[in-house]
Image: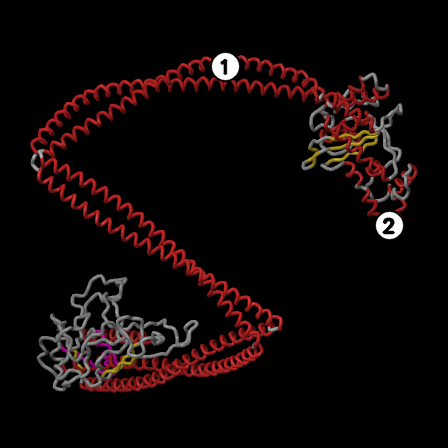
Amino acid sequence: MKKLRYTSVAVATLAAATLASANNKVSADATNNTVITESASQTVQDAVSDAQNAVNSAQSNVNSKEQALSDAQEKAQTANNAYTTQQSKLTDSQKNLANKQDAVKQAQNNLDNAEKLAQQATPENIKQTQKNISDQQKVIQNAQGNVNDANTELNRAQDQLNNAKQKQANAQKLVNDKNLAKQDADNNVSKAEDDVKNSGLNEAEQNVQKVQTTLDNIKKTNSSNESVLKQNQIALADNNKKIADLNNKIDAAKKNVADAQNNVKDKQQALATAQKALSDLQNPVAQDETSGAAGFFKSIADNKDNSESLREDAQTAYNIVTGQPNAYQNITVEWAKKAVDLGQEKDSTSLNNIEKALGYYQYWMTYRDKYGLSHPSISLTAVAIAMLSSDFQHYSDEFNHPILLTAKYGPFYEDEEDISAGEVNPIDNWMKEKADIDNYIKDHPDAATYSFESNYPLTQDEWEKDVDFWNDKPVYIGHYTSMIKPDANYVGLAGNEYEIQPLMNNADSMDEIIFNPVNGMDFDSYQDLVHSYLQNFKQEDKIKTLNANVVTANQNLINAQNAVKSAQNNVQSLQANLAELNNGSTKINKAISDTQAALAKGQENLEFEQKQLDQANQTLADVQAKVGTKAKALDDAKAAQSKAVEALSQVQKALDETNDEVKAAQSNVETAQNNLNTKNNDLKNAQNKLTALNQTLSNLENSKANLEKAQKALDNANDEALQANKDVITQQSILSSLKKNKEKADAQVITAIEELKQAQSDLTIAQGRLVAEQKIAEQEAQKDNQPTSQPTAQPSEQPTAQPTEQPTSQLSEQPTSQPTAQPTEQPTEQPTSQPSEQPTAQPTEQPTSQPSEQPTAQPTEQPTSQLSEQPTSQPTAQPTEQPTSQLIVQPTEQPTSQPTAQPTEQPSEQPAIESNTQLPGEQKNEEPQPMTIQVTTKKGKTSIVEPTNSSSTQPTTKQDAQQLPQTGNQKSSSLIGLGFASLLSALGLTKVNKKRKD
């Protein structure tokens, strides 16, 4: 632990305050030395005494708080131990309760099973079980017989295995004997070879064999080449034949291409003919369709088979839709040619819209039938007027009757007309006006008489009477009354598909005219005229036939064109095959040539090697003649060796056969053993089943007694579970009571800690004041010899009476950052730290009253709130100029003895003090843990060491004890004390310097 260090400014703090409060007079001599009066000196000594008393009092208070903390800790530990012990008891009682509850469940299951069995214990079931037992005994007898048979089969298989193993042993003995014989033959060959060794016989034989092998290889190669040559010659002939055949096919394929091309020309002409026939028919049809209603009306007018009145009616209709002058009623409709686009798809004169209007008429008749009304006749003139009226809605810029807009668009025919617009059936659109009548009658029931439905059929008189009634009523029913007018006749319906107004398409018109002479046609006749015209002008059957002809001709042309492509592709494919065959012939010819060359070379080699073989045989014969008997012995030994090898091979084959017999016999034994095991298992299962049946019979016969026994066991289990539950409740109640005691004791420990911290803070301040007063007293004693400037050499060692160890709760790390504002110039001699060693020279004069020892109240350790190390950086606001003199704390005399309780070594790590530790009992989902505080007491000083998570420092109490909460007061009080002292020091030093200058 680092030694405690003071700066001169800190030492001067209380001295300056004391001088100011004493209000003593100060004078200065010519040397500018400060002189303190006798009264001031006495005041300083009094201040030292007061400071010492304050230290003693503060130390006494610290000792008292330490004792209080120790007592509180002892009580807290006792409460915690009791709480922990009770927790264990509660856990044991809960486990016991769980076991008892499981026992209840098991007993209940046993009782349920016993009840079920009691229900099954009927005479019938008992009798059936007895029968099952009898049957099962028979099953066991059969199973026992199967086991006996399996044992017999196993014994037979075992005998076969034993016999096979004996044959195997005999065969193995023969193999061993023949192997010894072969070894003797091998030895004889080796001895004979040694006898003929170095005679040249082996070399001669090997040379003969080598040359013979070479000669055989050459013959084999030549034979292979001759075979290859023959195959290539056959392949060449076959390939040449294929080439000839393929050339013939290519000629035929080229002819097919020419024929197919001629066929394409024929099909093209046939298609053109069919298309012309179709066009010749479609053009007049298209013209008729373009004329639309005009063509329809013109065809009727020109048909002399029709009546004069019909032809006249048709001619008038034609003149109307084509916009002829004075077409009808001596009126010329000026806008007719502009509004009507004859025969166009959306126009009312299109044939599709003429046919569509037939449906409107039929639908209208369904309404008239409901009123018992007649079906009006159709007038072609009325139809043409309806067409103009419909197209007018598209032509004009407003939806209205043309007869009402003559001032703007010119005259129009006089008739009775209804118009409608929108994608709805116009008949429904007109008829829905009846809703106005129905709604009015709801409010005026008397009006029901005029509903047009009071009489059936509706007569013209009734209709007129009803119309007169509704004329002055708030209803809009003009279209409705027109639809149901009894004497309606000579009508025409038409509609278009134009856009009439934005978001509204289609305009329809129904017009009724006064026709003279009176000669209309019924609807069926009109419908026949329309359908007949559509069928005749469209000529759908002819056009369909001609279209089919065009499609067929076109498909024939496509087929012909595909045939040309196919024929051309066939020619190309055949030509590619021909090229491949020609290439193959070239390769075959090359292979034949190479093979013939190889055969010629092989023949030369064969003749050469034959000569070499003859020479080698002659050499061998010469050597054999020289070797004589030894060579014959070697040949005999090799012959005997061959016989020994053959004999060994035969007996080895016999051994292999016996090995196979042993394997087969072993397999049979295993199969028999498995069968026996299966039969034994069957017997065992049958016996187990019999045992179960006997137990079932026993249970059925004794079911009543078993049921009573199970009920008694359940009752006992319930009683024990109830008692266990009561024990849990009791232990829980005791734990809750102990928890309150524990929390109370923990709170008392926290209070004792805070009070001890405050007492230590007070002691620190008192000690600081005492040190300052003592230094002022030293200055008074040294006033004549005090130097005016800082010594050039600072002592290198701290006085031995100075504490050598920092308190346990000091900060453990240096500040990590430099101050934000360094002074522009560092002082030349800044006394930023205490000397680390004792001064080498003491002042020449020491006061006679200097104590021989340090004060008894001097702490052996610094308070727990003291900073452990000096900051590594300078203060944020350094003085820009060094004071001319500093107050230096030096002992006037070496202490005669060291403090009795000096620390011997520094701790490895100071316990960290945390300010965010949870309070006891605040752990989430946990019971409060015991709270333990370590208190270390030394001479005149007490430090509180609080448990942390540090691995190098362990508290002296229980290792897993809960860390105490920290409020930060310990650090804060110390820092406040030091800050306050620094402020007093600065003020005091300023005053002293000012007085010296004065």
| Quadrant into which the C terminus falls | bottom left
Secondary structure, mark 2, is loop
Determine which residue is flagged by label 1.
Answer: 256
Question: Looking at the image, is 788 positioned above or below residue 256?
Answer: below
x then y, percent, for residue 30 = 13, 76
Mark 2 → mark 1, Cα distance in angstroms: 95 Å
Choose between 840 and 685: the one closer to the eye: 685
Dot 2 or dot 1, earlier in sequence:
1
Question: Which residue in the structure is indicated by mark 2?
Answer: 444
* Range covered by the magenta-colored residues: 7-29
541 to 692, vertically: above or below: above
Q: Is residue 7 visible?
A: no
Is the residue 201 above or below the residue 324 in the image?
A: below
Residue 306: give x, y in percent of width and height. 84, 19
Residue at disc 1, secondary structure: helix
| The N terminus - image quarter | bottom left
**Which residue corresponds to the image point at 88% horizontal and 38% vertical from the top-left?**
372
